[in-house]
Image (tube, grey):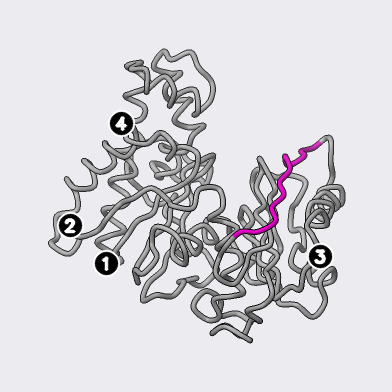
């Protein structure tokens, strides 16, 4: 049997989620259920080179039980060449122009192998089986070490010219704001990503280190930590209001490490969004936490295979 995308419905997809902190792999069933699952901390130079990183990924995948496969779907940190699948993740310096898709095609001959940005995989997962299920127009956002996103319009993934449609992290929210690693100034990512937010808080006198510590201190009422969360929520709310007016969205699903701060982030986000989303149609949009947690990227990677042209149009 096959689904609408031509994939056998009695086979699983090998789904892979690759990031600078962790690599995860799972066998995902046609309905989106995550079966066997493995993960490992991503090794970093000088402890591993490009080939060592590839061998680490293969060893992870080979821990999964042998199953009939419908294909291989991958979400990987960017930037990357798309749809060629040559990857150069910013936080994985061992891979620069690494031919990830080509290597996977060699390892799994005869199967479709589809590699996209990890934030796109997150968005597809949330649209297919998460917070955006049943909605036709969804923006997914990952707020973590960086700020990434993906875009579903008319019930289909929008890739854009280079596969970067939905990259909301580089929407300008403050033209006089801090410099961004992209070379611009005042990008959402330059303000709201975890390391930037922690650095801003330290400049104000906070003595912690990580975004997780910052959220913990904000929950305890530390005034600088609270202001930092308000700052992130403000920046996110401005960016989402702009995206909503441009794309006429139904749902915005927000995930990633910083989103786990809950109301400390979502309350100022919602207040700012409502203050700036003034058109009647924009007021109907719901901004919600992601529903699938750490599994969203794996579920979305599987949908690249199971979802047919809804989520993949490049062969």
**Between marks 2 and 1, how big is the CA–CA gap?**
10 Å
Quarter the C terminus occupies: bottom right
Prevailing secondary structure of the magenta residues: strand
* Camera-side mark, 4 or 3: 3
**Between marks 3 and 2, how big is the CA–CA gap?**
48 Å
**Between marks 4 and 3, how big is the CA–CA gap?**
48 Å
CB within 8 Å, label 2 to label 1: no
| Residue 41 drawn in magenta | yes
**Between marks 1 and 4, how big is the CA–CA gap?**
26 Å
Residue wearing tag 1: 248
Q: Position of residue 302 (x, y in %)?
A: 61, 67
Q: Residue placed at 48% from the left, 13% from the top?
A: 207
Q: Earlier in the sequence, mark 3 or mark 2?
A: 3
CB within 8 Å, label 4 to label 2: no
Q: Is residue 216 left or right of residue 48?
A: left
Pointer 3 local density, CA inside 10 Å: few below 14, some 14–19, many at least 20: few
Q: Position of residue 21 (x, y in %)?
A: 66, 40
Pointer 1 local density, CA inside 10 Å: few below 14, some 14–19, many at least 20: some
CB within 8 Å, label 1 to label 4: no
Magenta span covers which residues?
34-45
Q: Earlier in the sequence, mark 3 or mark 1?
A: 3
Closer to the camera in the image, 293 or 169: 293
Residue wearing tag 4: 230
Asked where in the image residue 264 lies, by quadrant, the reply is top left
Residue wearing tag 2: 283
Total marks in image: 4
Pointer 4 local density, CA inside 10 Å: few below 14, some 14–19, many at least 20: many
Q: Is residue 105 left or right of residue 191?
A: right
Residue wearing tag 3: 66
Q: Residue placed at 65% from the left, 47% from the top?
A: 19
């Amino acid at each position: 049997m096959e689904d609408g995308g031509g994939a056998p419905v009695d086979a699983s997809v090998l789904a892979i989620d690759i990031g600078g902190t962790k690599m995860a792999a799972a066998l995902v069933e046609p309905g989106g259920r995550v079966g066997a699952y493995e993960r490992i901390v991503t090794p970093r130079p000088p402890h591993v080179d490009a080939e060592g990183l590839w061998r680490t990924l293969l060893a992870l995948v080979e821990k999964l039980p042998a199953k009939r496969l419908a294909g291989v779907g991958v979400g990987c940190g960017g930037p990357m060449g798309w749809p060629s699948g040559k990857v150069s993740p910013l936080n994985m310096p061992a891979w620069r122009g690494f031919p990830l898709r080509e290597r996977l095609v060699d390892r799994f001959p005869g199967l479709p192998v589809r590699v996209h940005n990890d934030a796109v995989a997150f968005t597809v997962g949330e649209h297919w089986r998460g917070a955006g299920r049943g909605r036709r127009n969804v923006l997914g956002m990952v707020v973590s070490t960086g700020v990434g996103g993906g875009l579903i319009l008319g019930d289909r993934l929008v890739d854009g010219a280079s596969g970067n449609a939905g990259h909301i992290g580089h929407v300008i929210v403050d033209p006089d704001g801090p410099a961004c690693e992209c070379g611009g100034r005042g990008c959402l990512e330059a303000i709201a990503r975890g390391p930037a937010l922690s650095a801003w808080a330290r400049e104000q006198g906070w003595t912690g280190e990580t975004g997780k510590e910052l959220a913990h201190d904000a929950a305890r009422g530390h005034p600088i930590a609270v202001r930092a969360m308000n700052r992130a929520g403000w920046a996110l709310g401005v960016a989402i209001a702009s995206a909503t007016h441009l794309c006429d969205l139904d749902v915005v699903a927000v995930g990633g490490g910083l989103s786990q701060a809950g109301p400390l982030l979502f309350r100022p986000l919602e207040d700012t969004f409502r203050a700036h989303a003034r058109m009647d149609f924009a007021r109907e949009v719901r901004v919600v936490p992601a529903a699938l947690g750490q599994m969203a990227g794996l579920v979305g990677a599987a949908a690249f295979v199971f979802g047919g042209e809804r989520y993949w149009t490049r062969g």
